[in-house]
Image (cartoon, rainbow, N blue to C red):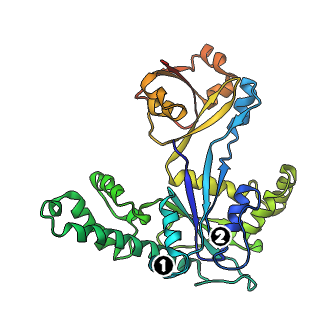
């Protein structure tokens, strides 16, 4: 599939650029202590952590590993009034529109030396951002309704009725993503390109002391189940260490993996993504697809011509591939399956596509 893009958003000085730098493992964004330091969005491609790839590579005896990747975009800080152009509002909202999902960063740390625009309450941080996105979406919906009000035919279409419904619900402060919709309305919603229709998750940037007692951390954000606690400062420090030193540092913190792994995994989850694998002497590689993707479309992720030329897919589960040490062992054990173009891909399928070229 095309590039997976996650926009990192939040009020100024909540730690967005520090988190972004940690994700990339190198300082590419200016994390200076003043608002709007990220004037143009920084973009970085981050590998999706995947312990299965080294296992596959060892089995097929290849040195080349190609993990799946997620693109993170560090977007300029937003302030109240951004929907009317305050701060860098118009640019901020345009950059969000180009992303597939939103990572909301809220401030849950105390540091009087860091300038803070707006509220110091994580709940209020989140609500300010959502309010600005809702205001912008209402402008979009109102523009359509105004253009359609004198068109008798348009006023009886499902799209017009949906726009009226969206307006009523958005005005109540409900994000488009959370509005109850029929399947038809869900498809029509895409025509509005609404900011609040994008899937999202929340990262709470906590202080160092909190991170060392992370099991006791419970930040409640109303109407949202999961908040990922991350100390962006510690994560950035970790990203600058060797792998061995990282493990020792994590052990000292009482953690078994960096918090950034949870951030990347959550990005996959909210977008409804999964991986499948190809493994041979050339490379062991993870490919990203939407959950529910069929075999022919999955083949098209490798090369678009494979959709038309699809013949079948040889598939072994990762567990069986590992247990029987490769294609031949899995075949001998009766674990290799031949699937057609309508087969729905499972997470962790190891695949070899047969295509007519």
Residue 113 shows in this picture? yes
Using residue 223 as the reference point, say whether residue 17 is left or right of it.
Answer: right
149 in relation to 276, above or below: below
Using residue 128 as the reference point, say whether residue 259 is left or right of it.
Answer: right
**Residue at position x 62%, y 13% in the image:** 332
Q: Secondary structure at mark 1?
A: loop
* Residue where numbered disc 2 is placed: 38
Quarter-of-image position of residue 67:
top right
Q: Are marks 2 and 1 in contact (CB under 8 Å)?
A: no
**Residue at position x 50%, y 67% in the image:** 224
Give the numbered dot on residue 128: none
Using residue 165 as the reference point, say whether residue 229 is left or right of it.
Answer: right
**Residue at position x 26%, y 62% in the image:** 162
Residue 26 versus residue 62: which sits nearer the camera?
Answer: 26
Q: Residues within 10 Å of mark 2 (few under 14, many from 20)?
A: some
Residue 213 shows in this picture? no
* Residue where numbered disc 1 is placed: 85
* Residue 2 percent location from the top left of the image: 52, 44
* Residue 153 percent location from the top left of the image: 13, 59
**Residue at position x 28%, y 67% in the image:** 144
- Residue extending farthest to the left is 152
- Residue extending farthest to the top is 332
Using residue 136 as the reference point, say whether residue 240 is left or right of it.
Answer: right
Q: CA distance from mark 2 to mark 1?
A: 17 Å
Quarter-of-image position of residue 238:
bottom right
* Residue 73 percent location from the top left of the image: 60, 60
Q: Secondary structure at mark 2?
A: loop
First in residue order: circle 2 vs circle 1? 2
* Residue 92 percent location from the top left of the image: 53, 70
């Amino acid at each position: 599939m095309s590039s997976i893009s996650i926009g990192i958003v939040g009020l100024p000085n909540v730690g967005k650029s520090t988190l972004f730098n940690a994700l990339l493992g190198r300082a590419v964004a200016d994390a200076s202590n003043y608002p709007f330091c990220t004037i143009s969005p920084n973009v970085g491609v981050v590998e999706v952590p995947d312990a299965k790839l080294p296992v596959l590579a060892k089995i097929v005896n290849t040195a080349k590993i190609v993990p799946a990747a997620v693109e993170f975009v560090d977007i300029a800080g937003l302030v109240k009034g951004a929907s009317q152009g305050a701060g860098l509002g118009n640019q901020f909202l345009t950059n969000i529109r180009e992303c597939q999902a939103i990572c909301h960063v809220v401030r849950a740390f105390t540091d009087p030396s860091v300038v803070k625009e707006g509220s110091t309450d994580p709940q209020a941080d989140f609500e300010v951002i959502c309010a600005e996105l809702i205001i912008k979406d209402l402008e979009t919906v109102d523009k359509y309704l105004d253009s359609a009000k004198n068109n008798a035919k348009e006023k009886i279409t499902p799209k017009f009725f949906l726009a009226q419904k969206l307006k009523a619900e958005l005005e109540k402060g409900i994000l488009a993503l959370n509005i109850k919709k029929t399947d038809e309305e869900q498809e029509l919603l895409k025509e509005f390109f609404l900011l609040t229709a994008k899937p999202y998750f929340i990262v709470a940037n906590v202080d160092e002391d909190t991170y060392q007692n992370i099991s006791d951390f419970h930040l409640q954000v109303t109407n949202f189940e999961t908040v990922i606690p991350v100390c962006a400062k510690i994560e950035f420090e970790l990203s600058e260490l060797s792998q061995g030193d990282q493990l020792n540092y994590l052990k000292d913190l009482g953690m078994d993996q960096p918090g950034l792994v949870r951030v990347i995994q959550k990005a996959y989850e909210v977008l409804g993504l999964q991986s499948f694998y190809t493994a041979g002497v050339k490379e062991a590689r993870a490919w990203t697809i939407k959950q529910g993707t069929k075999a022919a479309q999955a083949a098209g992720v490798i090369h678009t011509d494979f959709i038309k030329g699809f013949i079948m897919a040889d598939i072994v589960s990762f567990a069986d591939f590992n247990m029987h040490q490769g294609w031949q062992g899995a075949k001998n054990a009766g674990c290799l399956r031949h699937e057609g173009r309508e087969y729905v891909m499972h997470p962790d399928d190891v695949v070899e596509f047969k295509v007519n070229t």
